[in-house]
Amino acid sequence: LDHVQALQFKPEGPIYIAARPRESDAADPDFEVDHAMFEDLVWPALVHRSAAFESLKLMRAWAGHIEWNTFDGNPVLGVHPQCANFIFANGFSGHGAQHLPAAGRAIAELITTGEYRTLDLSRFNYERLLTGVRVPETVSMPISSASASKRGSSTRRKQSTTSPTPAMVKGIL
């Protein structure tokens, strides 16, 4: 996920899926695939992220709506500050399948007990949209202390640097 270029890409089996919102009105009902958009915007952005995308082949394309939190790409969870019986659980920006089990539990706890108990998800509250406080997305994974000691003082694994091969990209426009 690249918030600067509004670009999403991820591996899916032996291929990659790439997506980018159109510059036009989000309510635009035009679901025609714009192949020029891939050539002019998506492909150059992919190549900017990894030169291995230079020789990709577009296999299929799709046009439609995806949920996208344009503020920080993270969900909005919790009680509305001015309407106590309005609870947010939205804005997952494509992370829904990953986050919904934890978010569902947290919202259930919030409804039944008035607070988060298992996981404190209060940083994803609606107020951050009003105050301009973004929740940055970080990518790091803890590694075992034995592996860390072999490499020195590092305690985090770097993000995967696996590069795509030419025929591994499926574009979603």
Image: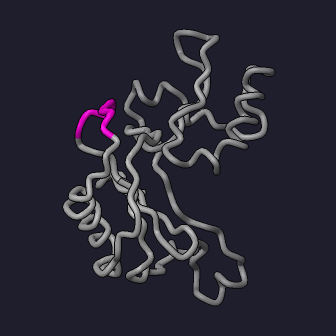
Point 45% across, 44% down: residue: 73
Residue at left offset 61%, top offset 67%: 141
Location of residue 72 in the rendering, given as x and y in whole percent from the top left corner? 42, 42
Instruction: Kindly identify the residue that appears in the image at 27 percent across and 70 percent down.
Output: 48
Name the spot of residue 145 as percent of width and height, x first. 71, 78
- Identify the image quadrant of residue 69: top left
Q: Tell which of 46 and 71 is nearer to you.
A: 46
Quick check: is 25 in the magenta stretch? yes
- Find residue 165 and report its horizontal and vertical position in percent: 42, 83
Principal SS element in the magenta part? loop
Relative to residue 143, is residue 124 depicted above or below?
A: above
- The residue segment tinted magenta is 24-30
Q: From what the image shows, is residue 141 above or below residue 69?
A: below
Q: Which is nearer the eye, 161 or 150?
A: 161
Whether residue 158 is visible, yes or no, is yes
Q: Is residue 167 left or right of residue 30?
A: right
| Quarter occupied by the N terminus | bottom left
